[in-house]
Image: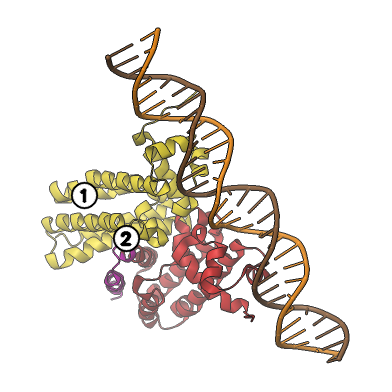
Chain colours: A yellow, B red, C brown, D orange
DNA sequence: CAATCATTGTACCGATCAGTACAATGATGA
DNA sequence: TCATCATTGTACTGATCGGTACAATGATTG
């Protein structure tokens, strides 16, 4: 009996493990234990080892946000895209039960390994949100601060809801942030 | 030649290492490497090993916040205590170059080891801030949400400023949060 | 001075770490 | 049918992990 994978099948599985255990906490044996994928397969698809695995996960996360969040913010109807961002973010992070891997990597030494990817992810999120805010009628002087407040607010809501083990905190925080941004668009 | 330590001298050194490397990333050899403290001393003061070391650090952090932030928020002049909170938090986290260990532990599997301590730290911060907000004239219905927004905002600002490697982002975020809370106190 | 005892450095333990080597497997295409 | 080749399971490496054992050190106390 031999199960055959593709790289694209493995990345989402790796993502959940890195999310739960962090970069240092994720060992190859834990990956095998949870997924059934052996070292042979892992090093076949990711010759660069653990670092390449985490890099692939970050790229996958980034691609999802680019498609589902950033592009709509830049191109679609601004108000609709902002509203969609809140619901999509709430779903993606499963009301706070799932963390933001990029944000988590930013907090410890792992940042040194992926500083470019981490910076890019947040810069583009903020820029896209600022673009939508301006198009929706936000004064340009406030747009940058407000966009940073929104993105940082999501990260803070994730920390807090996990710390309190209360998913209502996450949903409520997103709601407060949404109203905060909405108030400026008159 | 033999250097003699006390437990109280070691805890702050451990704190910086856990902050930088995270719980899993912190190994006993790294501790010895950075501090010169050998395993003999470490296990003499912390018989429970790495878990007890991290627990002692969390207790130390908690005690600092209790004394410098929570108690003033509960007892002192409300407006002054809130204003002092922002400056003390900015100093404590060194404008975002230092992370919140409690928040970082909340994000990965480490949470399972210290869920009580993590929950307590944030609950008490939020409660103390809410108490000050109410005494300063904030409508009771808004106080809880606003307190959560403030505490979560600090955590988000830490993530964002580290991700962008820009300490201005942290200070600016704290400033925005301060204005946000101030606006309700009329 | 002698005795005690907290503290420390070092050698060691089995387990696990990331990573390598390679033969066995099995699907694909000539 | 046969050859090719991507993919996989397994056994292995040296290094490092958290933790233990214990003798040497040196300050304190009677």
Disc 1 on helix, strand or loop?
Answer: helix
**Magenta-highlighted residues:** B161-186
- Of the numbered discs 2 and 1, the one sitting upstream in the chain is 1
Q: Residue B156: which quarter of the image?
A: bottom left
Q: Classify the position of the N terminus of chain B by image quarter.
A: bottom right
The circle on residue A153 is 2
- Residue A77 at least partly seen: no
Q: Is residue A28 above or below residue A157?
A: above
The circle on residue A70 is 1
The nearer-to-camera label among 2 and 1 is: 1
Image mark 2: chain: A
Q: Is residue C12 left or right of residue A155?
A: right
Q: Classify the position of the C terminus of chain B by image quarter.
A: bottom left
Q: What secondary structure prevails in the magenta region?
A: helix
Q: Nearer the viewer, residue D20 or A137?
A: D20
Q: Position of residue D21 (x, y in %)?
A: 76, 62
Circle 1 crowding by C-alpha within 10 Å: few under 14, some 14–19, many from 20: many
Instruction: State the residue at coordinates (35%, 75%).
Output: B137
Disc 2 on helix, strand or loop?
Answer: helix
The span from disc 2 to disc 1 (Cα, nearest Å) is 17 Å
Q: Is residue A96 left or right of residue A134?
A: right
């Amino acid at each position: 009996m031999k199960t055959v994978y593709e790289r694209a099948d493995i990345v989402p599985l790796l993502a959940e493990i890195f999310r739960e255990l962090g970069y240092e906490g994720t060992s190859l044996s834990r990956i095998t234990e949870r997924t059934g994928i052996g070292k042979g397969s892992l090093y076949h698809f990711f010759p660069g080892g653990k670092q390449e695995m985490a890099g692939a996960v970050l790229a996958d996360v980034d691609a999802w946000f680019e498609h589902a969040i950033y592009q709509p913010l830049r191109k679609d109807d601004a108000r609709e895209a902002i509203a969609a961002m809140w619901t999509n973010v709430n779903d993606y992070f499963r009301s706070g039960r799932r963390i933001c891997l990029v944000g988590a990597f930013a907090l410890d030494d792992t940042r040194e390994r992926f500083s470019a990817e981490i910076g890019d992810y947040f810069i583009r999120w903020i820029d896209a949100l600022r673009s939508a805010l301006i198009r929706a009628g936000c004064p340009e002087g406030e747009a940058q601060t407000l966009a940073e407040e929104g993105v940082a607010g999501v990260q803070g809501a994730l920390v807090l809801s996990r710390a309190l083990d209360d998913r209502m905190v996450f949903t409520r925080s997103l709601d407060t942030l949404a109203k905060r941004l909405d108030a400026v668009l008159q």
